[in-house]
Structure formats: structure tokens, C-alpha cells
């Protein structure tokens, strides 16, 4: 039953459905522009950078995968862990740190193949690490403005440094990651009861274009306040080089990018951002909610609209409980496949790595983990007086 449902959900994000989403997004952005050009333009300026950044990261990830970086990193992660529990714990810590310092989508794009290769090199099941990559990336995206591109959309109204933002969200971040990891571990405890050692020789690490590009993009994301265009430029450049020397195929580039999905989500985000500026309903609703209610509404909106469009709809202006809103927008997407772009990136990246991600299983675990992680994060917000 679960496998059948997971298969239907996988088909939803591919094929004709992605082009339907693209058409819906294109129509939505045209309609928004016709109805209120100024608000549509303001909404587009608020939400364009996440999509541009993701495009650049996907291109860089393609080049890195061709150079075997993911296979080599996964093998070395596997050899460092004496058993399945230690491997999962190390993967959870790595996911939390990479998501915090870079961002949610970087973590999913770069670490999904690493963890797939880590599980394979030990001869273990991929499910704990693969599901953990998705759910822990979402749950671990609270601590810094750049950790989740939703944070950037929503917090454009506030003048907070990264250190100030971290002061509010550090404890909620830790609580969310720990609770989510524990829930995944309990669900997948049988798969983690292993102590298998590697039987394969380590894959060689090549210091080539892929590694240089990953280092460069990491530096850009860490240093620049607006890294989207530079990262896209790097991605386009390295893929162009690979196309010229015939080490990349144009069809593979199109497959990796999934342009119809990006177009569709961008158009919907702009349309909802326009609606949020013209209609006072979302603002009025949030003004009557306490922090718990705010987080619940944000989580529900992320499932209905996707968290990027939901942020544009709910926060065209400064909300009364911004950090509680972020708890819902960042953790809530673990409830369902529509919750965030990370679900689609995770699914596509796993498939390109030769894996079969269990979407249905991930959603079942998410249904348990999300309310617990949100409750823990909100409790920590209360401790830091950030509610």
C-alpha cells in the first residue's frame, strides 16, 4: 500500500505534471501582473533569488557528481562510522551544519548523493540516511537567515545581523534537529543495528573542476549577502565548459534542472505574494493568532502552497510573531511532498544517484516528527523570549 502510494507521488513530480505546474505558474504570474503590476513586481523582487540560487547549485552538483566527489565522500563517511547508529548520528550532524551554514537546498542537493553512496559502500539500507537527508535538512534550516531561503523572503522586513538572528533561533534549531533525528531513528531502528565494514576500495578523489567549483560556491554562499547571481554564473560557466569538452549532455542538464517545476513554483510564489499585498486577510489572521497558532497556520500553508509561496503570501509585511512563523514554514514542509522545493530536489537527486526514495515512508515519519519538532522549537523560543 505504502509503496504504491509512494510510486504515484513520485510520478506526480515528473513527466506531464511538471509541465502542468509550469503552465499554472506562468498563467498565475501573468494574471498577477495584469491585476496589479506594482504588487506583482514587488513580489517577484522578493522571491526570485531562491530560485536562481537553486538553479546554480543544481548545475554545480551535476559537475561534482561527474567528477565522483559524491561517491568518494560517501565512502569515507561510511568508513569513519563503526556501526549504523554512529553513521546516522554523523550524517545528522553533518546535515545540520551544512544546512545552517549554506542552506536547505544546498544540503539536499550536495548531501543526498553522499549519503546514498555511504549506505551502499557499507552494504546497508539507504532509507535512514536518505529520509534523514530530507527531513533533517528541513528541520535544521532555522538558525541563520540564509539557512532556509524562506527565512530570507520573510525576514526582509527586519534589520537583524546573522548573529542576532542566531541568538533567537539557535536553541529552536538544536531542539528541532534532535527531535527529528530521534523520530527517524526510532522508525528506522532495525536498519541502524549494523556494524558492517567496507568491502570496496575507496573511490579516488580528483581535485578537478568539480571540487574547485564546490569550494568556490561554498565560499560565495558564506561570504556574500546575495549569492544567487554569482552562484548561477559559476554553475552556467562550469556546465558550459563540460558541454564544450563533451563530458556533459544537454539532456542530462535539462533533467537535473527540472525547469518546469522551478517556473511553476516561481509563478505561484509571485501570484501569492501579489495577493498578500493586495488582500489584508492573511495579515489580519496572523494578527489574531498566538505563536502556536501562527506556527500551525504557517505549516498548513506550506503544505497547501509550498513554503516559498506561503512565505510570500503570509509575510508581504512584518508579521507579529516572525520566529514562530518561521518554525511553521521551515519545519512544517516535512508533513507532505508539496511542502518545500527540497522534496523535489531530494527526489530528483536521489533518482539521479540510482536510488528509489520512499516518499510515502518519509511522509509517515514526517507526520510524527513535525508536531514534536515544532513543539520543541516553540518551547525553546519561549526560553529565549523570542515568541
Image: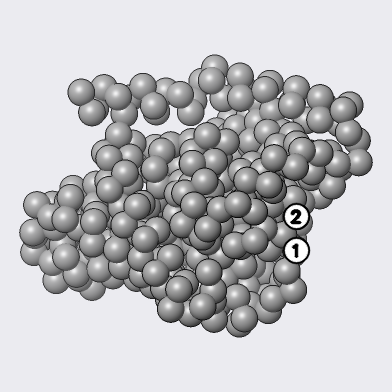
* Residue 219 in view in this figure: no
Question: Dot 2 corresponds to which residue?
Answer: 317
As drawn, the label of residue 268 is none
Q: Which residue is mark 1?
A: 157
**Residue 258 image position (x, y, % from top left):** 58, 34
Q: Earlier in the sequence, mark 1 or mark 2?
A: 1
> Splitting the image into 4 quarters, where does residue 139 fall?
bottom left
Residue drawn 81% across the image and 39% down it = 278
Work out whether 210 lies above or below 353. Answer: below
Q: Is residue 36 visible?
A: yes
Per the model, the C-alpha gap separating discs 1 and 2 is: 7 Å
> Which residue is located at x 23 percent, y 56 percent?
183
Query: Which element is circle 1 on?
Result: helix
- Which residue is drawn at the image coordinates 67% and 58% (left, top)? 319
Taking depth in this image into account, of 169 and 348 the one nearest to the observer is 169
Q: Is residue 327 left or right of residue 182?
A: right
Closer to the camera in the image, 241 or 65? 65
| Image: 85 above or below 271 | below
**Percent position (x, y) of residue 54?**
62, 50
Q: Which quarter of the image is occupied by the N terminus?
A: top left
At x 79%, y 43%, the residue is 277
Kindly check if marks 1 and 2 are in contact, taking CB atoms under 8 A apart as contact: yes
How far from the left and from the top, in percent, is residue 121?
A: 22, 56
Q: Is residue 57 left or right of residue 115?
A: right
Colour convention of the picture: one colour
Q: How far across and how far down the image is residue 220, in percent?
A: 67, 69
Q: Residues within 10 Å of mark 1 (few under 14, many from 20)?
A: some
- Label 2 crowding class (10 Å Cα cut-off): few <14, some 14-19, many 20+? some
Left or right of 291 in this view: 129: left
Instruction: Kindly state the secondary structure of the residue where label 2 is placed.
Output: loop
Q: Nearer the viewer, residue 317 or 155?
A: 317
Q: Is residue 77 above or below residue 171?
A: above
Amino acid at each position: 500500500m505504502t509503496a504504491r502510494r509512494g510510486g504515484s507521488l513520485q510520478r506526480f513530480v515528473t513527466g506531464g505534471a511538471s509541465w502542468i505546474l509550469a503552465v499554472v505558474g506562468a498563467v498565475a504570474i501573468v494574471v498577477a501582473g495584469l491585476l496589479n503590476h506594482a504588487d506583482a513586481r514587488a513580489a517577484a523582487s522578493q522571491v526570485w533569488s531562491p530560485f536562481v540560487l537553486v538553479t546554480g547549485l543544481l548545475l554545480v552538483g551535476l559537475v561534482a557528481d561527474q567528477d565522483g566527489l559524491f561517491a568518494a565522500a560517501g565512502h569515507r563517511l561510511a568508513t569513519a562510522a563503526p556501526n549504523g547508529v554512529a553513521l546516522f548520528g554523523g550524517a545528522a550532524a553533518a546535515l545540520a551544519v551544512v544546512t545552517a551554514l549554506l542552506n536547505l537546498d544546498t544540503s539536499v542537493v550536495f548531501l543526498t548523493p553522499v549519503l546514498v553512496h555511504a549506505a551502499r559502500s557499507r552494504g546497508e539500507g539507504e532509507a535512514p540516511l536518505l529520509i534523514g537527508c530530507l527531513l533533517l535538512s528541513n528541520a535544521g534550516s532555522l538558525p541563520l537567515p540564509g539557512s532556509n531561503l524562506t527565512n530570507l523572503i520573510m525576514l526582509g522586513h527586519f534589520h537583524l545581523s546573522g548573529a542576532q538572528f542566531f541568538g533567537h533561533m539557535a536553541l529552536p534549531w538544536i531542539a528541532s534537529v534532535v527531535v527529528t533525528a530521534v523520530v527517524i531513528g526510532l522508525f528506522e531502528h532495525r536498519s541502524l543495528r549494523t556494524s558492517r565494514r567496507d568491502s570496496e576500495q575507496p573511490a579516488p578523489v580528483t581535485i578537478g573542476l568539480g571540487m574547485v567549483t564546490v569550494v568556490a560556491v561554498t565560499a560565495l554562499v558564506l561570504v556574500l549577502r546575495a549569492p544567487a547571481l554569482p552562484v548561477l554564473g559559476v554553475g552556467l560557466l562550469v556546465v558550459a565548459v563540460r558541454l564544450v569538452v563533451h563530458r556533459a549532455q544537454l539532456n542530462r542538464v535539462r533533467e537535473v534542472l527540472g525547469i518546469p517545476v522551478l517556473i511553476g513554483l516561481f509563478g505561484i510564489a509571485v501570484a501569492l505574494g501579489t495577493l498578500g499585498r493586495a488582500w489584508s486577510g492573511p495579515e489580519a489572521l496572523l494578527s489574531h493568532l498566538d505563536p502556536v497558532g501562527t506556527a500551525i497556520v504557517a505549516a498548513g500553508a506550506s503544505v497547501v502552497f509550498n513554503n516559498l509561496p506561503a512565505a510570500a503570501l503570509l509575510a508581504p509585511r512584518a508579521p507579529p510573531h516572525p520566529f514562530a512563523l518561521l518554525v511553521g514554514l521551515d519545519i512544517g514542509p516535512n508533513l507532505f511532498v508539496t511542502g518545500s522545493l527540497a522534496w523535489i530536489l531530494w527526489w530528483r537527486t536521489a533518482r539521479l544517484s540510482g536510488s528509489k526514495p520512499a516518499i510515502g515512508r518519509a511522509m509517515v515519519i514526517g507526520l510524527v516528527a513535525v508536531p514534536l519538532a515544532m513543539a520543541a522549537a516553540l518551547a525553546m523560543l519561549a526560553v529565549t523570549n523570542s515568541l
